[in-house]
Structure formats: structure tokens, C-alpha cells
Amino acid sequence: MPQRFKIARRYRATCRYVADALQDRCNNLFFASPLRKFFSFFALSKRDATMIGTVRTPLSLEETGLEPYRTLRRPIDHRREGLFVAEGEKVVRRLLGSSIRLLSMLMTDPLLDRYRSLVEKRKEPIDLFIAEKKLLEGIVGFECHQGIMAVGMVPPPTTLEATIAASPLPRILVATDHLTSAENTGVVARNCAAFGACALLAGETSADPWLRRSVRNSMGTIFKLPVLYAENLADSLRTLRKSFGFRVFAAHPRRGSVPLFEADFSGDSCIVLGSEGEGISPAVLDACDEAIAIPMAEGIDSLNVACASAAILYEAVRRRSVPARNGCTGPA
């Protein structure tokens, strides 16, 4: 190894040692934090410099590069720019482990070492903003994001045809109609990932699954779930039925709805969820094969849509796992 590389390696190792010592032994001194940041910056290896774009300590949320973090109340602007925001340690950790492109991370100083190795494994350079807790408390929802946030690029949507072709048989697809709650959409996405749905199809009147609150409530499972968008959900459902042989179920409790345990989920199936207030629109209902309902105690007419999605998906998966008897699959 050339002598200059050996010197550089020793220099970086020394800086890292000093930074760690400041944290372990001198953390109670007022000058320890800024000194540690100084030595941590120079401890970055050549490989770090490739994977970490810049390491900055902002003094204000108005500084360049922090625009997505200080505009959390403008999610439509983020989506127009193709951005999404991830909040919280578990969500950010799952984002770092995904193939989705990251642009930057904002965190408190104690979290830098915890995430450094994960950032170094990334292929793209990521800008790191290391801020004081007081600064982060000025951001909307500080209690929720646990002192760490990240900004990434929303992956380009795939097509219905490509998603179906890439999914194993039998397929389960979930579609949303008039589901405007970002929080519920996030939980539905989490349930889709948990029960093996091949994709989440967001109707034209539904919340985008990549909104900040949706990403947060999905607990990062959205990073492994294909998201599709329908310009006209009713037309998309008819295409699923006629061109791909899907059976489309409307989760719509009403007189004449089929009890959930009697629905036939043995083939490719699409489950349509609506809003808690209005349910599924008439046009979308007309595009479905049948309406299904979860049996409930007398006097209770519905569940939260996120809870309902979990119950229906679980039953569909359970029914498929029960061995066929006399040519039919049914309750054990």
C-alpha cells in the first residue's frame, strides 16, 4: 500500500478515536459536541466520501437542502417533485435497506454513528444534516419522527400488466376507492405487505400511499410493495376481470352482501376498499363481481377500513392455505 494511503488511514483512524472519546468521556463538557462533529467529519473515509454527499450541521431550518423537512405541511408539493419523507428509526432503517433512492437524512448527533454503516453501504451519495434537538423540535410531528428523518425519491409506478406478470399465482390485489385518509392508507399498505398482496392500486379519489403520514403508518413496508395508480378505478377493475381473469370483491357491508367466510378467494382476487363514511362509490361497485361483508355482532355495522382490510386479507390467505376438500376450499 502506498505510504500516502497509510498516512491517510492513520489520520482518519485518529480522528475517529478522538470523536469517540469525546462522546464517551467528555460528553458533559459544553465544547464536546461541536468538537466531536469536527473530528467525525474528518474521520470519513474515502469510501464514506463517496456514499455520504455532505455532512452539515445546520443552524436553521431555512438553510439550503432542508426544504423538504420544513415544508412537511405541503405534501402535494413533495409529490409534485417526486419526493417522499420517511420518519422514525424503524421506517428510516427499512428505507436504508431498500433499493429506493435516498437524497438526504436529518438526525440528531447521537444517531450519526448508529446509522453511519448503513449509509456507507448505499450506492448513491446521501447528504447528512446533523442538527440539535432544539432545531428538530421546530419540525411538524417531532414526537413521531424520533429525531431522524429522510427524504427519498418515489419510485416510478409500474403498470398493471407488468405487476401481474411478475406476481406468483394465485394473486391478491388491493384497490382503494375514496379512501382519503393518509393514515388509513398507510395501515392498508402495511396489511398488504404482511399478507402478500402483489400491489396496492390507488383509485383517482384516494390518498397517495407515498404521502408522509402514509409512509409513516406503513412502518416502511411501502418500500417493498408495488403501488399502482388508476385514472379511472372502475375501468381498471373491469380490465382486471375481462383481461386477466380476476374476481373483484367489494368490501361493502349491505343487504345481500356475501359473508366473508363464503367468498371464493381460490383464484386471482382483487379486494376493493372504500372510505368509512361513504363506502365504495356506485360506479366502482358496478365494476365488481360481488360485495362481501365481515360478520359482526348485532348493532355493529362496520369496522375501521384498516382493520377490515386485515381481516379480509387474513381470511383470503387462510382459505388458500387450507387443503381442498371435494374440489372446494373452505373453512377448516
Image (cartoon, helix red, strand yellow):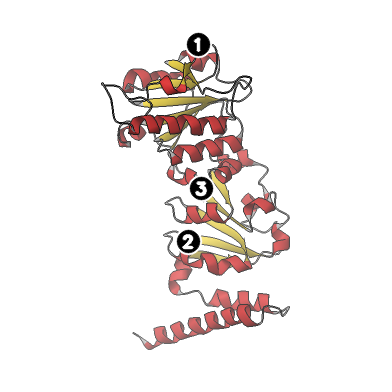
* Circle 3: residue type: Gly
Task: Point out the image quarter for the C terminus.
Answer: top left
Q: Are marks 2 and 3 in contact (CB under 8 Å)?
A: no
Q: Residue 256 carries which label?
A: 1
**Can you give x and y, in whole percent of width and height, for residue 68 in the image?**
62, 50
How far apart marks 3 and 1 lie (CA) works out to 37 Å
The residue tagged 3 is: 220
Question: Disc 2 or 3, which lies upstream in sequence?
Answer: 2
Residue placed most toward the observer, 293 or 173: 293
- Disc 1 crowd rating (10 Å Cα; few below 14, some 14-19, many 20+) is few
Mark nearest the camera among 2 and 3 is: 3
Q: Residue at position x 63%, y 56% from top? A: 146
Give above or below for 155 relative to 257.
below
Q: Residue at position x 66%, y 41% from top? A: 74
Give above or below for 57 relative to 195.
below
Residue placed most toward the observer, 64 or 233: 233
- Disc 2 crowd rating (10 Å Cα; few below 14, some 14-19, many 20+) is some
The residue tagged 2 is: 125
In the figure, residue 38 lies in which quadrant? Answer: bottom right
- Disc 3 crowd rating (10 Å Cα; few below 14, some 14-19, many 20+) is many
- In the image, farthest residue toward the left: 326
- In the image, farthest residue toward the front: 332
Q: Residue at position x 34%, y 17% from top? A: 242
**Can you give x and y, in whole percent of width and height, for residue 171 in the image?**
35, 31
Question: Disc 3 or 1, which lies upstream in sequence?
Answer: 3
**Can you give x and y, in whole percent of width and height, for residue 184 in the image?**
58, 35
* Circle 2: residue type: Pro
Question: Disc 1 or 2, which lies upstream in sequence?
Answer: 2
State how many labels appear. Answer: 3
